Amino acid sequence: MTEQLVRHYFVDEAGDSALFNRRGKVIVGTPGCSGFFILGLLEVPDPIRMKADLEKLRSTLLADVYFKDVPSMQREARKTAVAFHAKDDLPEVRREVLTLLKNSPGLRFFAVVTDKMRVLEYVRQRNMRDSSYRYHPNEVYDYLVRRLFRDRLHKADVYNIYFAKRGKADRTESLVKAVERARERFYEKWGIVSNAAVRISVGTPEQYAGLQAVDYFLWALQRLYERGEDRYLVYLWDAVKLIHDIDDTRRHKYGEYYNKSNPLTAESVKERKTPGI
């Protein structure tokens, strides 16, 4: 009996999918609202080892007197002392986590990026056709799930997929449908049937260490798109397999695929065009 090939995917987002405030005013790109929305997937070959490595690093840092009185390092703050989160972690902590991830064997990162101005353009066009239509932020999230998983579910026997929890609502059923739709689209395109078992879980970074790891990759990617800083992504680039910018249509209508042969840089992001409001 042959051993089953099992893959472990950890999925999270960077940026936000909001387009409007409560009064219906466009807020894309304003302070507190991102210009891009990114969905990322990190394949972790050994989640148990990842958990052990991150917990060991956290214990070492918490025992270091240098961090003794740092607010984010106190357990009651429920930040670094509970789970690594790039946005909340100190630069010194961030450097340690980035180094750990860089040296972790077998990590594979994939992401889909959408320009929220393009999403806004779609919403306005749809409103012109159907005045009753109302945009919901979950729409773009579920769409990116389908894009992200379309080519990711046909080479193993079992896929364990861990999504970072979003808000209070239980969206597991919607995620299952989005993943299944991705598998259907793959069949429609290539005629290849995937009978792999897909197990979906929704949780927090505290529960699943892989979600802490994918958060760091997404943070690095977001820093590039929102601030033009590419040094963090360059540092992790060996583990980056594919980034699909679906709205970078300068050369292809399907967007741009960035990988080892076509690296994503600060210059390439700076040159991309965004439609006006």
Image (cartoon, helix red, strand yellow):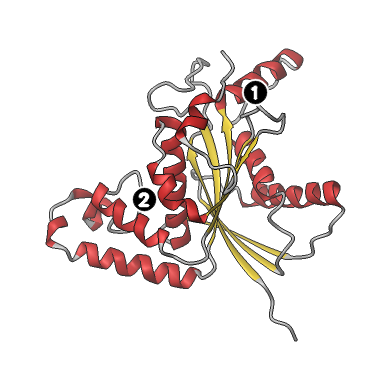
Q: Is 73 left or right of 85, judged from the image as shown?
A: left
Above or below residue 75? Residue 15 is above
Quarter of the rendering occupied by the N terminus? bottom right
What's under tag 2, amino acid-wise?
His
Q: Which mark is residue 85?
A: 2
Sort mark 1 into few (<14), some (14-19) or many (20+) by Cα contacts within 10 Å: few
Identified at 66% across, 27% down, the residue is 249
Name the one closer to the observer, 263 or 217.
263
Question: Residue beneath label 1, please?
Answer: 134
Q: Which residue extends farthest right? A: 191
Identified at 64% across, 19% down, the residue is 121
Above or below residue 47? Residue 109 is above
Q: Secondary structure at mark 2?
A: loop
Identified at 24% across, 58% down, the residue is 75
> Where does the image place residue 227, in percent across and percent down from the top left?
39, 31
| Separation (CA) of disc 1 from disc 2 | 33 Å
Which label sits in the foreground, 1 or 2? 2
Sort mark 2 into few (<14), some (14-19) or many (20+) by Cα contacts within 10 Å: many
Identified at 44% across, 27% down, the residue is 33
Q: Secondary structure at mark 1?
A: loop
Above or below residue 125? Residue 61 is below
Quarter of the rendering occupied by the C terminus? top right
